[in-house]
Amino acid sequence: ITGGHYDVDCRLEGPDGAVLYKEMKKQYDSFTFTASRNGTYKFCFSNEFSTFTHKTVYFDFQVGEDPPLFPSENRATALTQMESACVSIHEALKSVIDYQTHFRLREAQGRSRAEDLNTRVAYWSIGEAIILLVVSIGQVFLLKSFFSNKRTTTTRVAS
């Protein structure tokens, strides 16, 4: 979501240790696969090339089709009106969740940019205040030198 040039390395390994997906310096990507066996799949995000820049990464899993809401959905007879209403509400809520996730992502990106901009404005303002203070002090000394009487002293040399 945020940080640096968004260059992140990503790797996905299957339960047997085989690399299923490997990309370097990606800003965004999508990868779809069907798990061929049960087990623990490992994925790793790396910020190896720019270790000084912290990054925030978002990833999402979408796992196939949901099981039927009602076990009787697979039957050959028609669904009752209540069951079909529940199914359509469930599908609508899934799309609402997807939209909400998308908007939360966008909001997080916007918040990060706003915080970065706020930091830059604060530093710029502090710099301007320091410059203004230095110039003001310089002007005071300059004006003071215009109005001060310089005494000239003469010395006689005896011969």
Image (cartoon, helix red, strand yellow):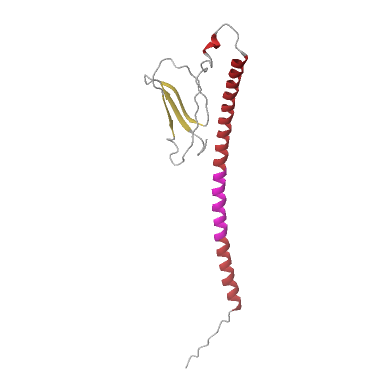
Dominant secondary structure of the magenta stretch? helix
Q: Vertical placement of 40 versus 146: above or below?
A: above
Q: Residue at x 55, y 56 (%)?
A: 127
Q: Position of residue 118 (x, y in %)?
A: 56, 48
Q: Which residues are magenta?
A: 114-130
Front in this rendered view, residue 101 or 76: 76
Q: Residue at x 58, y 75 (%)?
A: 144
Front in this rendered view, residue 159 or 91: 91
Q: Is residue 92 left or right of residue 62?
A: right
Front in this rendered view, residue 28 or 89: 89
Figure quadrant of residue 36: top left
Q: Position of residue 25 (x, y in %)?
A: 48, 31
Q: Is residue 127 magenta?
A: yes
Q: Vertical placement of 146 versus 17: above or below?
A: below
Q: Residue furthest top?
A: 76
Front in this rendered view, residue 155 or 85: 85
Q: Vertical placement of 68 versus 143: above or below?
A: above
Total tally of numbered discs in the picture: 0
Q: Residue at x 56, y 41 (%)?
A: 111
Q: Position of residue 134 (x, y in %)?
A: 55, 64
